[in-house]
Amino acid sequence: VASSSFASHLQKSEHAARQDQLSVLASRQSLINFHLALHHQHLALALRLQLAVGIRFHPLRNLFCVTGNRAFFCPLDSHPLIPLDRVDDAIMEKRHAFLVKVAEQGGMEERRLAKDLEMEWKLTVNEICFMQALSSFRLGNDHQASLELASCVRDDRSAVALARVLAGRLIHLATESNKRYSTAHSQYLCALAGEEAARVELYESQFEDDPLVEKNPKTWQEAVTSLGRAGNSVPQSAQAAIPFVRMNDIAKLYFGAHWVNN
């Protein structure tokens, strides 16, 4: 009985005029609130970034104000007054911190999506852009990093971050050259580099005939000189420039490498 009923239904559906086109179904629905849909899209994108990067202990509700959180439970055809990017400074700071964490821990795709969300929230795009450059320098891809750095706003915070990477490269250069720094120089570089000493590396080809191999440093001495030149113009104050000047002197003293004539 069941099979004959199904066969009858199938036969009728094949001959019946189709009334359920997408346009017809859509015309029966209430119009949705664009800003509310966009609000949901922001949440979905933030959730995707959180899951992709594995950021724990960062509740997504903190990225939205009370009104914004309440709006997630409203019908899509309702019209709550959603602030979107017009939130208070505390929410803006939390959004900024979240996206910077994504840029630090994520890959190129996550940083691209973070930049999109940053623009939607009307935040500055400089931080994400700089994190892309910093990540490329850590991987030894100085060619790509220099292109990304050129579009960033230069400031002292960026200079400090690049100085730490440069110190990490100088530590690896000593190992490569089988040389030992003086106690004072060794302590200075280790303190400045911190975790960057374990993060930095020379560029490794991702595939055969990779054109970036010829455009990036192949030795630690080339890497030190490359980053020294790229980072030397970033500091905006004399205080922030001191690490670059001092590391230039260290590189010149031990390896004859330098990027500033003094």
Image (cartoon, rainbow, N blue to C red):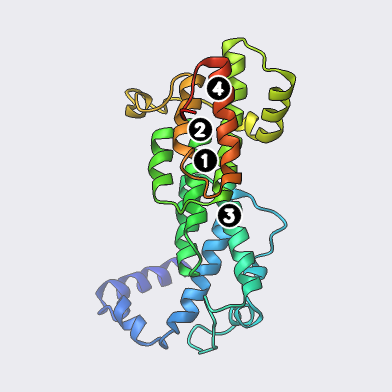
Element marked by disc 4:
helix
Q: Position of residue 45 (x, y in %)?
A: 52, 62
Element marked by disc 1:
helix
Q: Which residue is mark 2?
A: 139
Residue type at the position of mark 2: Leu
Alpha-carbon span between mark 4 and mark 2? 21 Å
Q: Which numbered disc flags the more N-terminal residue, 3 or 2?
A: 3
Q: Which residue is mark 4?
A: 251
Q: Which numbered disc flags the more N-terminal residue, 4 or 3?
A: 3
Q: Which numbered disc flags the more N-terminal residue, 3 or 1?
A: 3
Let me know if residue 52 appears in the view.
no
Q: Which residue is mark 1?
A: 135
Query: Which class describes the residues within 10 Å of circle 2: few (<14), some (14-19), or many (20+)?
Result: some
Alpha-carbon span between mark 3 and mark 2? 18 Å
Q: Which mark is residue 126?
A: none
Of residues 62 and 163, the one drawn nearer to the viewer in this rendering:
163
**Residue at image location 31% in from the left, 74% down from the top:** 13
Query: Disc 2 vs disc 1: Cβ atoms closer than 8 Å?
Result: yes
Query: Disc 1 vs disc 4: Cβ atoms closer than 8 Å?
Result: no
Q: Nearer the viewer, mark 1 or mark 4?
A: 4
Residue type at the position of mark 3: Val
Let me know if residue 71 appears in the view.
yes
Spot the residue most to the front: 262
Q: Which numbered disc flags the more N-terminal residue, 4 or 2?
A: 2
Query: Which class describes the residues within 10 Å of circle 1: few (<14), some (14-19), or many (20+)?
Result: many
Q: Is residue 171 above or below residue 71?
A: above
Q: Which numbered disc flags the more N-terminal residue, 1 or 4?
A: 1
